[in-house]
Image (cartoon, rainbow, N blue to C red):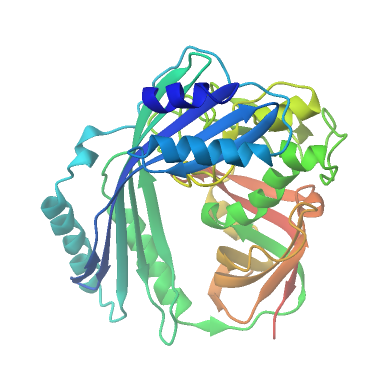
Amino acid sequence: MDRILKLAKKSVDEAEVYYLRSKSIPIEFRDEKIEEIKIHEYTEVALRVIKDGKLGMSFGSPDEPDILVKSAVKSAETGSKVKFSFPEKSQIIDFENYDKEMETPPIEDIVRKILAKIKWIKKCNIKAPIMYGINIGIADITIANTKGLNVNYKRSAFKQYCMIVLPQSMMGPYVVDVNYRFREIEEKEFEELIQKFEIAKNSVTVPTKKMRVLFSPEALWTLEWRLTEAISGKNLIEHLSPIENKINEKIFDDKITIYDDPHARGYFWSRPFDDEGVPTRRLPIIDKGILKNFIFDLRTASEYGTESTGNGYKGRWSSEAISKPVSPYPCHLVWEQGSLSVKEQIKSIDEGLICEDLLGAHSGNIVAGQFSMNVGTGFYVKDGKIIGRAIDTMISGNIYDIFKNIHSISKERNYELKPWVLFNGIQVAGKG
């Protein structure tokens, strides 16, 4: 990295090196057999330079510093004008989201435990295919620049999911967990999964009308995506955000409090600095329905006349997309929990849906908050009881309408610290 910076400094005003060493081990199971196991290891470098006020970028192997520098300098010749400088040295804190064992994980022991779980599910009279997948990964990231910054952090991840596939389908109810270290999914979660599968075998059609819809934590991201685009400094300076001039105004139901928390200890997403080396911080986004902050990277902050919030990332919720330009994204959106249990939320539904998985999240004008999605794995609820799996069903609306009409937020939160959210009235289109 020092060699790359020294070479770059001869030709440019400022330079920044982003070094990534990553390793991932995905393993796929089908029933009690391993279908696939791979090992991916990469060492990559991205170089950003500022020359005559223009930004240039290149990426590739750290073994080819001359090519990296020449490519970045060439890129800066036609690059866009920027007003920012790379950050100087700053204090960095460790957030305990790295388990050294994930560097050389005990694969045999992990596989044995997962196969035992699959066998246990099969013994519960489950005759459907069981898909189980894990991905063990580590990332070692260093950012250094010509202003004196040189920071490093490591993170590890153990991602796993288990799905019971419904007949004549590639989908089904599932359970998922992500953490910075290996941990077994609790047996009670598999018991709930089996119960959902038995209910899902009964397919039902749903009427077309507005009704209450309960979003699982895993489905909630489809709505969050609309919000994150609206609070992005990029869409703010382009005047695309519908909430551009609404700081400190109430835009949602007062039950909603959301903050970006890259400092949640022990969580895979936690990180001390963003992909530009700017220190991260806990940032309120929505406080009891009131909009509190937008998010910025160095570039959008300079154009908007403010400071970076430490949200400059190469990809949404990821730092492994080394070839991508930096843009403002949240790191780890956390919702404050509510007062009702999920069971109590379901009992309060006179007629409605439970959405656990949605398809077509990209549909609609995302920045404007619009959505129109197919229900993948979902359930129809009548008089507080789950009747069966909802088929041939769509939901549509706008977050700036439905986020003002919240019935409740659950006490329970998932591994991401996201709750179940029950909306009072969402347009549902079915064939019933």
Residue depicted at 52% across the width and 30% down the height = 274
In depth, the one of 75 and 230 nearer the eye is 75
Instruction: Determine whether 304 is above or below 366 in the image.
Output: above
Quadrant of residue 254 within the rendered picture: top right
Is 418 left, or right, of 153 in this rendering?
right
User: Residue 316 location, x and y as percent?
Assistant: 56, 46
Residue depicted at 52% across the width and 55% down the height = 218
Specify the farthest residue to the right. Answer: 245
Residue 356 makes an appearance in the image: yes
Figure quadrant of the C terminus: bottom right
In depth, the one of 331 and 172 nearer the eye is 331
Is 402 left, or right, of 205 in this rendering?
right
Residue depicted at 44% across the width and 82% down the height = 169
User: Residue 119 location, x and y as percent?
Assistant: 18, 68
Quadrant of residue 253 within the rendered picture: top right
Residue 338 makes an appearance in the image: no
Figure quadrant of the N terminus: top left
User: Residue 200 location, x and y as percent?
Assistant: 47, 76
Quadrant of residue 309 within the rendered picture: top right
Instruction: Determine whether 42 is above or below 335 in the image.
Output: below
In depth, the one of 229 and 145 nearer the eye is 145
User: Residue 95 location, x and y as percent?
Assistant: 40, 24
Is 319 left, or right, of 375 in this rendering?
left
Residue depicted at 51% across the width and 21% down the height = 9
Q: How many marks?
A: 0
